[in-house]
Image: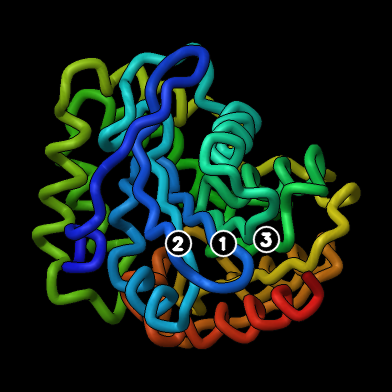
């Protein structure tokens, strides 16, 4: 994590089935922003975007997903819908009436689910290189799911090695240190069960956007290796959500780490518009 997040105390929330780890800047103007990492990731995925949002005056909350990071390992359900319930529980716990939810990769579907199920709690959603309304998978994607993902269950180091694939261009200065943190987290006792749960989950549902009424922004790295045509997918997702899209030129699967300023430049005008509506 960067210095801003290091200064924040890790807190925990007990919910049915386990314990969630999160941090909260507590202060800020306008609508709070909740940042959710992707599958097998840590909330420190936002370590370089976080200070840019707080510097702009926003209250920022980040949460480790069930089974990951500093959250407890063993849960019965690791689906986007289950995580949506965790998000609502966290909002209740923090006394946040409405928030902008940002989902990365796997949790793009989660923020869509929350917006559809609890529209009164969601001021806007942002999908960052998300699996939602995906086109049929190509051979590379099938290979990733069929080979690499199960292998990570037994050999967490493969996930660290795969990060080079997900950052095809710009990499943050702490890239190697973050890779080491990811691997160390997956080696903790009980994490294999969580990895299996995520790998088997439905990460790219279709049709969920029909019930979303809040403003939506789709952010996509132009060089995301997970998708054969990132721009086409972003357009498809934005259309399903009746929102708009921003392409981060050169960005891989995690532009908030590789291109944090460009990602902030995409998010901040959207957040300002949401605050005006609110």
Query: To which quarter of the image does residue 55 belong?
Result: bottom left
Mark 2 / mark 3, whichever is N-terminal: 2
As drawn, the label of residue 15 is: none
As drawn, the label of residue 125 is: 3
**Please, what secondary structure does the residue beneath circle 2 have?**
strand
The front one of 25 and 219 is 25
Which residue is disc 2 drawn over?
60
Q: CA distance from mark 3 to mark 1?
A: 12 Å
Q: Is residue 110 left or right of residue 227?
A: right
In the rendered image of this protein, does residue 205 appear above or below residue 100? above
Q: Is residue 269 left or right of residue 53?
A: right
Q: What residue is rendered at 41% in x and 28% in y? A: 13
Q: Nearer the viewer, mark 2 or mark 3?
A: 2
Residue 231 rendering spot, x and y as whole percentages: 64, 76
The front one of 267 and 91 is 91
Q: What residue is rendered at 69% in x and 77% in y? A: 245
Whether the residues at callouts 1 and 2 have beta carbons within 8 Å, the answer is yes
Mark 3 / mark 1, whichever is N-terminal: 1
In the rendered image of this protein, does residue 154 appear above or below residue 43? above
Q: CA distance from mark 2 to mark 3?
A: 14 Å
Which residue is disc 1 drawn over?
32
Query: To which quarter of the image does residue 64 belong?
Result: top left
């Amino acid at each position: 994590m960067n210095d801003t997040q290091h200064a924040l105390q890790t807190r925990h929330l007990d919910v049915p089935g386990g314990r969630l780890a999160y941090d909260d800047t507590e202060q800020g103007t306008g609508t709070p922003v909740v940042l959710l990492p992707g599958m097998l990731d840590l909330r420190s995925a936002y370590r370089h975007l976080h200070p840019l949002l707080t510097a702009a005056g926003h209250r920022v909350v980040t949460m480790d997903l069930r089974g990951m990071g500093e959250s407890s390992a063993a849960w019965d359900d690791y689906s986007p819908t289950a995580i949506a319930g965790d998000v609502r529980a966290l909002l209740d716990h923090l006394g946040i009436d409405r928030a902008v939810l940002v989902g990365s990769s796997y949790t793009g579907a989660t923020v869509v689910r929350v917006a559809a199920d609890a529209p009164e709690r969601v001021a806007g959603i942002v999908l960052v290189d998300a699996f939602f309304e995906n086109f049929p998978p190509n051979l590379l994607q099938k290979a990733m799911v069929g080979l690499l993902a199960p292998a990570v269950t037994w050999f967490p180091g493969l996930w660290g090695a795969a990060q080079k694939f997900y950052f095809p261009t710009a990499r943050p200065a702490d890239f190697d240190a973050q890779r080491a943190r990811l691997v160390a987290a997956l080696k903790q006792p009980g994490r294999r069960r969580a990895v299996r749960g995520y790998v088997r989950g439905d990460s790219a549902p279709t049709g969920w956007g029909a019930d979303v009424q809040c403003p939506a922004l789709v952010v996509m790295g132009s060089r995301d290796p997970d998708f054969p045509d990132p721009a086409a997918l972003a357009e498809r997702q934005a259309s399903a959500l009746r929102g708009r899209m921003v392409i981060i030129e050169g960005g891989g699967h995690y532009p908030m780490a590789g291109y944090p300023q460009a990602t902030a430049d995409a998010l901040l005008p959207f957040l300002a518009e949401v605050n005006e509506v609110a």
